[in-house]
């Protein structure tokens, strides 16, 4: 449990208690044998008392000696045993005590799915390193243990500094309010034992990941949360600044190219992180949306392992329809110059393969196991070249009206249309790959900006649905309370032939 030494005072029965028992027992035996010395002296002195007296005293003292050796030892042994037993019982009591509380703490963290996903290095930790508010000493394992059941007394980083600050060691008496740092990269953390919801947005260069995050964040923080009386709070100053940029971009209808920092010590992916607080959420939720430069997937050039794939509860895979050669050929004349300039250039299958490799690398899991993470495949930019009439809202409504017998569910119909669109445009192998590797996948269409870039405020459509679907998968409470869109449990497999038969 608490094997890592902590800068804190050990509980009496695990620290000083040992030494005290040892000392007491040693003392008892010393006293016992000291009395033997006295008897020996008596015998030596008796020599000067005449023969008869000497023999008498000798016999007397030898008997006394035997008595001390036999009965004294038995008594001392018995007293020692009792002493050890008492300390042992107390020790076991304390041990059981802290084990129970430790277990309670662990079960609470596990059941509530609380952990820390470092927003900088992305490493996961169950208990971060807590900092003593008195002296700054690092407590790497602030849990109930030999240093105390509910509280521990800080000793300071260098013993002798005599800090003496008392720190809480559990979730229920204030540990979450202490300052914490990441055990892996020492970044300052403000997670406060919240429940993280981690969603990476992946895809090739210029597919519209950053625009998607901008649209989602603005809509979620500006509309969804207030409409449900949830409060949102930025993770820290830095994330608040990211939101300022998001708001600016949202107003002007632009996006910023996401850099992969040239400094290899800087993280390749940036998390936009905010707390969601409200009645259904105890403890509060901490949303991390990860933006990563698409170049990472095309050039395999990331600065660090994307650890978040290991524990994320869902993934958004963005697809730029105009990066599909057939679609691009067909639509190029209808696209604005900005839109042509913004087309993702990487091959979609290549991106998926590269992404799967990264997943495998990070999770160390077989293809079979890793497929349990829900995947939302999102076709973006459908405002351009009339794609909305193929996969967007209007297309869904038309099909549902035409075939009410087959198409009753809005998002199942959207999923059907997206798959059909991809299949008809030469992406069959991509579809098969997704179905093979991710058993829980759903297809969506959206437009983040709503029009060509830099032409006024964002007018997003369909951005919330994939996120709501993933949030609901990540968190049952979220599924109950954020339910504007309704999703069927499983996407039904509808063959194209069935629709085509009458349409
Ligand atoms: N018409 C239209 N264009 C979009 C939309 N979203 C993105 N774009 C275009 O795609 C370009 C790239 O969008 P970004 O959001 O920066 O793409 P990204 O995936 O973050 O790209 P990297 O960060 O470079 O990997 C933008 O400059 C726009 O021209 C959209 O919803 N509609
Ligand atoms: Mg970007
Ligand atoms: Zn870290
Ligand atoms: Zn201290």
Image: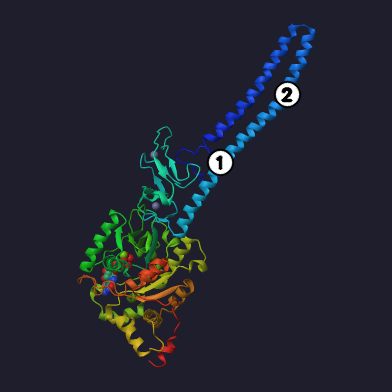
Task: From the image, tell me which residue sits under label 1.
Answer: 91
Residue 76 at x, y = what percent?
66, 29
**Left or right side of 263 for 8:** right
Residue lying at 71% horizontally and 27% vertically, measured from the top left: 71
Look at mark 2 in the image and give the residue it sits on: 67
Residue at point 19%, 71% (across, down): 456
Question: Along the line of sight, which residue is nearer the eye, 103 or 342?
Answer: 103
| Residue 450 occupies quadrant | bottom left
Q: Is residue 9 above or below residue 496?
A: above
Query: Where does the image place residue 285, in percent across and percent down from the top left?
Result: 37, 60
Q: Nearer the viewer, residue 388 or 132?
A: 132
Expressed as whole percent of the image width and height from the top left, the position of residue 346 reads 36, 70
Label 1, secondary structure: give it. helix
Residue at far bottom of view = 502
In this picture, residue 398 sits left or right of residue 500: left
Residue 353 screen position, x and y as percent = 44, 69
């Amino acid at each position: 449990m608490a094997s890592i030494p902590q800068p804190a005072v050990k509980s009496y029965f695990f620290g000083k208690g040992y030494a005290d028992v040892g000392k007491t027992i040693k003392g008892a035996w010393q006293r016992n044998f000291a009395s033997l010395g006295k008897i020996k002296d008596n015998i030596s002195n008796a020599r000067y008392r005449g023969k008869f007296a000497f023999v008498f005293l000798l016999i007397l003292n030898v008997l006394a000696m035997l008595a001390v050796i036999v009965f004294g030892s038995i008594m001392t042994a018995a007293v020692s045993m009792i002493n050890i037993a008492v300390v042992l019982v107390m020790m076991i009591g304390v041990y059981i005590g802290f084990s129970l509380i430790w277990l309670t703490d662990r079960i609470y963290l596990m059941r509530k799915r609380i952990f820390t996903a470092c927003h900088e290095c992305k490493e996961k930790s169950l208990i971060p390193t807590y900092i003593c508010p008195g002296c700054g000493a690092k407590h790497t394992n602030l849990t109930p243990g030999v240093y105390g059941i509910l509280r521990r007394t800080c000793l300071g980083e260098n013993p002798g500094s005599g800090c003496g600050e008392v720190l809480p060691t559990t979730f229920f008496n204030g540990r979450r309010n202490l300052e914490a740092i990441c055990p892996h990269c020492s970044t300052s953390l403000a997670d406060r034992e919240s429940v993280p919801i981690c969603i990476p947005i992946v895809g090739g260069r210029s597919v519209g990941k950053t625009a998607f995050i901008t649209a989602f964040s603005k809509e979620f923080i500006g509309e969804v949360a207030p409409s449900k009386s949830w409060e949102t709070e930025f993770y820290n100053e830095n994330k608040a600044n990211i939101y300022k940029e998001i708001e600016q971009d949202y107003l002007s209808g632009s996006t910023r190219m996401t850099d992969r920092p040239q400094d290899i010590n800087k993280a390749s992916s940036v998390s936009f992180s905010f707390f969601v607080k409200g009645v259904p959420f105890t403890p509060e939720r901490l949303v991390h949306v990860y933006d990563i430069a698409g170049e990472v997937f095309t050039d395999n050039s990331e600065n660090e392992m994307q650890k978040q794939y290991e524990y994320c509860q869902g993934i958004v895979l963005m697809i730029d329809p105009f990066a599909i050669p057939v679609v691009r050929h067909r639509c190029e004349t209808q696209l604005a110059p900005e839109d042509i300039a913004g087309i993702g250039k990487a091959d979609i299958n290549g991106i998926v393969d590269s992404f799967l490799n990264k997943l495998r690398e990070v999770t160390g899991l077989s293809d079979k196991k890793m497929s349990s993470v829900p995947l939302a495949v999102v076709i973006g930019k459908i405002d351009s070249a009339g794609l909305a009439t193929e996969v967007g809202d209007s297309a869904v409504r038309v099909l549902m009206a035409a075939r009410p017998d087959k198409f009753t569910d809005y998002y199942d119909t959207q999923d059907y249309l997206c798959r059909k669109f991809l299949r008809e445009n030469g992406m069959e192998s991509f579809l098969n790959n997704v179905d093979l590797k991710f058993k829980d996948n759903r297809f969506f269409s959206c437009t983040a900006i709503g029009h060509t870039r830099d032409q006024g405020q964002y007018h997003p459509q369909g951005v919330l649905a994939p996120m709501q679907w993933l949030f609901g998968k990540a968190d049952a409470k979220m599924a109950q309370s954020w339910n504007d869109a309704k999703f069927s449990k499983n996407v039904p497999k509808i063959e194209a032939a069935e629709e085509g038969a009458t349409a």
